Amino acid sequence: MRRIHIRDLNFFSERFPERPNPYFEWVWDRTLQDNDVTVFTDQFLHEALRNKSRVKVGVLFEPPAISPEVYAFARTHEEAFDYICTFDESLIASVGSKFVPYIYGTSWIHTGTWGVYPKTRHASMIMSSKKITPGQRLRHEVAGRYGSHFSLFGRGIRPIENKIDGLKDYRYSIAMENCRVNAYFTEKVMDCFLTGTIPIYYGCPKIMKFFNPVGVYTFENLDELDGILKGLSEEDYRSRLSAVWENFAKAVEYFWFEKSLWKSCLSRVV
């Protein structure tokens, strides 16, 4: 198995580099060694300036709305890397740049519990107390206006130990990214697809490029959401089951961001 070292702060346990994938083995580098290939993510990008690994790859996990300083660093220090993987189309379009596209995808639901579950409940929403980004603030507006229309879960509201418990029984779930960025979608929508739940989605403007549009609703504001909520029903869900199954299969493919990293650049240097 190919081994790739990683310097990372996004995942606080060793579960991330130890999660198996068919492309390569992550090795958590805690001492900033000079390796054959080292991946530097977000808050560790600056370490590439003093590292002498044969190949240095940057990976931008968080969007600009969360970590603007990381994007500023990547723009001004791209020469320190062989590649920088990102979903930011403005960076990828830079003439002669080292930025290459990848798909984040991923999931917070254990792979062994994925499936299109029988649905006995109407709709849910899982949220946090954060109000920093546009998407986070809009979540609270949605919960305030429509909270009585669905089961609401989250810290300080109705905690659940496992995220799947807020999805698997529900025909629909409101899934909102922290911000809207082309080609950027995360576990927030993926976890819906991986439990057979139709997402009512705020986020990636190009989500229809990746998934069957019949199996996902999208909105940009409260007025659009209002119209969607009025049309939801058990019959509507059943009419979309073929797309639900198709999107489940697509989500399984997008789960491995390692696969996307491998295709974008790592296969060329390992």
Image (tube, grey):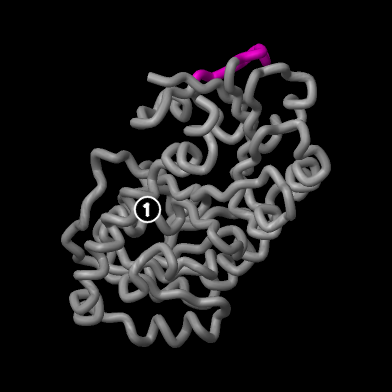
List the residue tagged with mark 1: 191
- Measured along the vertical axis of the image, is residue 205 above or below residue 117? below
- Measured along the vertical axis of the image, is residue 227 above or below residue 173? below
Q: Is residue 147 visible?
A: yes
| Magenta-span inclusion, residue 51 | no
Q: Outermost residue, right direction?
A: 76
**Which quarter of the image is occupied by the N terminus?**
top left
- Closest to the observer: 28 or 83? 83
- Measured along the vertical axis of the image, is residue 25 above or below residue 84? above
Which image quarter: residue 167?
A: bottom left
Q: Give the left or right position of residue 32, taking residue 216 as reference.
A: right
Which image quarter: residue 7?
A: top right
Q: Amino acid at mark 1?
A: Asp
Q: How far across and how far down the image is residue 135, in percent?
A: 61, 64
Residue extent of the magenta highlight: 27-35
Q: Residue at the location (53% across, 65% down)?
A: 204
Q: Residue at the location (38% across, 42% down)?
A: 161
- Label 1 packing within 10 angstroms: few (<14), some (14-19), many (20+): many
Q: How far across and how far down the image is residue 259, in percent?
A: 42, 40
Report helix, strand or loop for mark 1: helix
Q: Residue at the location (65% across, 53% down)?
A: 92
Q: Is residue 151 visible?
A: no
| Magenta-span inclusion, residue 29 | yes
